[in-house]
Amino acid sequence: MIEIKDLSKRYGSFQALDNISMNIDAGTVFGFVGPNGAGKSTTMSILATLLLPDSGIAKVSGFDVTRHPKEVRRRIGYMPDFFGVYDRFKTDEYLHFYGASYGIARAEREKLIPQLLELVNLSDKKDAYVDGLSRGMKQRLCLARSLVHDPEVLILDEPASGLDPRARIEMREILKELKRMGKTIIISSHILPELAEMVDQIGVIEHGRMVAQGRVSDIQNRMRVNRVLHIRTLGRQDELAERLRDENHVSRVLSDANGLQVHFSGQDQEQMQLLRRILDWEYEVVSFNEAQTNLEDVFLEITKGGAAT
Amino acid sequence: MSTKNKWGKGGSLWINPVLDKEFRLRMRTPRSFFAILGYVLVLGLLAMGFIYVTMTSRGVQSGMRFDPSTSRMLFYVLSIAQLVLVAFMTPALTAGVISGEREKQTLNILLTTQQSSSAIVLSKLLSSLAFMVLVVLATLPVYSIVFLYGGISPSQLMLVFLFYLFTMLLLGALGIMCSTLFKRTIIAVIMTYGMTLFIFVVTGVAYLLFMAVVQQSYYSSTPPPEYSWVGFVLGLNPVGAMISIFEPEISKQAFLVNGGNLQNQAPISLWLEFVLVYAVVIALALWVAIRKIRPVGRRRDEAEDAPMPRSGLDGSGEVAEMKPADGRSDKN
């Protein structure tokens, strides 16, 4: 559905994109993750036909964004990270305008727009002037606007930025609904928890380079080479800590009142052998579990925490 | 507003949603009505002032008459004043139409719709010009004073209004070009006023200077020339071109050097030269605006159909590759 190959873009001396490549299949929700200035918005602007790449290829539904921009525009719904609205428009007029701009007949829009307003929970604001809406409502209206021509692909650049927690949850629910509708969504964020629940794949971009890409669970597994194990025993905790420090794959052992925190770089097989050895040493193990890594940990690990915000 | 009044099917320029949106938003602000009021007031006061000054300067002895020749003079004064007002207002109305959308962060969204670049640019231009036409038409009652006293034919009035329309189109096209080329509205407005100043003032001053030089060298030439190329410079000036509509003889005189034969024809009427030259400028300005509003597509040859990499999920839902997508170390 979305194909990017060796895409590069430079602004003066700043290399915004440096040969990034990725593939996103139809129906996938792709989380584009990276710190501010990493190149997410540049990639999305190129996909939205708003920016020309210096080199490389970007295709949407098989159409090259530079050679067939009109075909691409027909297939994408784009929501930029910063956007304005026409202040003297009413909410439904705003959607009618964009619907007409996509060549949708009036009769069709009359049916479509109430549905869109309902989807984004703005039915009661139909006759309200756009400049009177809150930030969250404007974000939702802009999302409805990006759906007005029923695009195959949604390109959402930081759709939840600047929203309060409630508005953020509302936005997340709408995006889940869109996922259920089978839309291919490419969504960028530098705030990871908001993406974690809903994305199928993520791409981590830093300094214009794609540093990791794949399914969330697989990337998490990959990151588990540096997993943290929590071990609690009945007594002899410090003695066990000493013995564990000499074990392979153990880089660090912390001991406190809650038990041991073991930084472990082995895979599942080595982890199982470690547990077996502890039991062979006849320690009375109450619990032995692995700390869950979330998307944020993954991102920080991949980017080494450098520029994450 | 009822949804019954919403846009028809988009696509055609004349019922273009961008054009409709511009009309709707422009007329929803009281600023438009105050602009029309102010404009008509200025022109009305000018007409009243002219009548007052003319009548009082003639004194009681002449019977304080306002005859057709004075009425004709009033028409000229009003027409030139209106031309100057058009020159002031058109850049202000057009130089911000694209850059303003860019500053309000609405342009990017508009550019991702199915509206073509030409539809966006021409709709913006037409809506601005439509407002200017409304402003100029609102001054017709002021012109009715002229008709009250005679001296001007309706066809002359119509020609003058057509000339305004062309001048608006010219300044509007330059304004929209600057608005597309410059990111900030203030820069676009300054550049458009700079071009307007060039067209209105620099061409006029250049004509006077060149004519002075040609007149000075008149007697040193053998035989003395009857016509000079300098007239072409005046044909680039809107005021000169408009006066040639009132008084066709002006075209001839603009090219004549002292002692020339008035029986000869001018190489071209000033207004015709103005229209021909600036029609090309309008076309060029609009072409640049349409070309520059969106990034231009380009051709790719070899790389176009190259197979794409399949990092991430493949069609079967399995992870095809888990190394960094660009093949670099993920520590960078």
Image: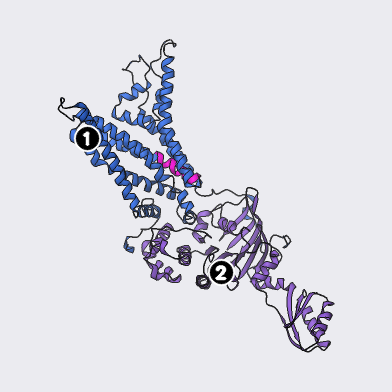
Chain colours: A purple, B blue
Which quadrant, please, contains the N terminus of chain B?
Answer: bottom left
Kindly identify which numbered label has been placed on residue A75. none
The amino acid beneath tag 1 is: Val
Q: Which residue corresponds to mark 2?
A: A27
Please provide percent x and percent y for residue B83. 34, 36
Kindly identify which numbered label has been placed on residue B146. 1
Please provide percent x and percent y for residue A181. 51, 71
**Circle 2 Cα neighbour tier, 10 Å, few/some/many (<14 / 14–19 / ≥20):** some
**Disc 2: which chain?**
A
Residue nearest the viewer, comparing B327 with B147: B147
Element carrying mark 2 = loop
Quick check: A227 left or right of B295? Answer: right
Q: Is residue A277 visible?
A: yes
Residue nearest the viewer, comparing B30 with B245: B30
Main SS category, magenta section = helix
Q: Is residue B289 visible?
A: no
The amino acid beneath tag 2 is: Gly
Q: Quadrant of residue B142?
A: top left
Q: Quadrant of residue B139?
A: top left
Which quadrant, please, contains the C terminus of chain B?
Answer: bottom right
Q: Quadrant of residue B149?
A: top left
**In the figure, A105 relative to B103: above or below?**
below
Q: Is residue B4 magenta?
A: no
**Of circles 2 and 1, which is in front?**
1
Q: Residue at x 37, y 62 (%)?
A: A106
**Disc 1: which chain?**
B
Quick check: A22 left or right of B232? Answer: right
Q: Is residue B181 magenta?
A: yes
Q: Which residues are magenta?
A: B170-182
Please provide percent x and percent y for residue B72. 24, 30
